[in-house]
Image: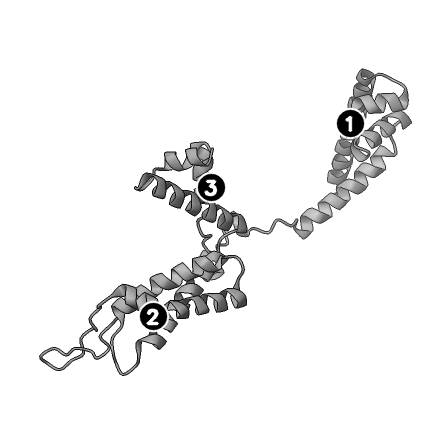
Amino acid sequence: MYNIAAEFDQTGHHQRPVLEDIDTIIGQHSALVRRTAWHVHSRMSAAIDVEDLIQIGLTALVEAARTFEDRGLSFAPYAATRVRGAMIDELRREARMSRAGMVNRRILAAARARLQTEYGRQVSDREMAASLNMTADAYHHMVASTQAMQQDAIDESYSDHDMWFADAADSAETILEKCQLSASLAQNIGHLPQREAMVLQLYFAEEMNLEEIGMTLGIGAARVCQIKKAALDRLKAMMREEDAEDERQK
């Protein structure tokens, strides 16, 4: 393992410890990695397999061995901190990925590992898609789903001119205009002949089609269409007359 007694250079400063055998370091600290993985997995997330956390921890262990400097502390506490930190960082990345993306990533990783073992080399996207019985577009869509979603601070992305932050609710003036229009329509519909008023009621309020209205009134769909058009033309004329009257009163 590491020569924990750090070597010194000619000026007496600490050098990085010499890495003697990485397999020895992994063997001596694998229990620490597994224990940390199970602890993190049970406390913080079930969205990632514990075996994945273990692999992340082993990678962090190797990196810790390469960067460790003896400053009066033993290697184990330093490694434990680095291993746990790497696992937490991975969970944070997972939190920005959809659950479907997590599942897809595991499927892709398993397929890639199987093909690389079979072929003894890196595999292409075409080979991956074929092994999963997917088209190229479907495969690339699947790969895209495994990318973490970017989260930006609202203060950094907000803009008064950005449509994404626009208020979709009607303004007070618009609400008032709609209410006035509805009241005017209801009043004018009451002045229509009974059959025309009924056709509009069935068509707009009951959402019946022309054939259904015809069956209700005992007439053909073509005749219903004529009545509806006549009723709408009459309503438009009434509304224009009201607007002209309002202008005269102003």
**Residue drawn at (41%, 69%), measured in percent from left and top?**
31
Vertical placement of residue 83 versus 241, above or below: below
Of the pair 111 and 223, the residue shown nearer to us: 111
Looking at the rendered structure, the secondary structure element under dot 3 is helix
Query: Who comes first in sequence, dot 2 or dot 3?
Result: 2
- The amino acid at mark 2 is Gln
Distance from disc 2 to disc 3, alpha carbons, whole Å, reads 39 Å
Distance from disc 1 to disc 3, alpha carbons, whole Å, reads 51 Å
- The amino acid at mark 3 is Met
In the drawing, what numbered circle is on residue 73? none
Write down the residue under mark 3.
142
Q: Quadrant of the N terminus?
A: bottom left
**Residue drawn at (88%, 34%), measured in percent from left and top?**
190
Between marks 1 and 3 in the image, the one whose residue lies nearer the viewer: 3
Query: Who comes first in sequence, dot 2 or dot 1?
Result: 2
Q: Position of residue 234 (x, y in %)?
A: 80, 26
Q: Position of residue 150 (x, y in %)?
A: 45, 54
Rendering quarter of residue 203: top right
In the drawing, what numbered circle is on residue 232? 1
Looking at the rendered structure, the secondary structure element under dot 1 is helix
Distance from disc 2 to disc 1, alpha carbons, whole Å, reads 86 Å
**Is residue 152 something one can see in this rendering?**
no
Of the pair 64 and 232, the residue shown nearer to us: 64
Write down the residue under mark 2.
28
Q: Position of residue 187 (x, y in %)?
A: 85, 38
Between marks 2 and 1 in the image, the one whose residue lies nearer the viewer: 2
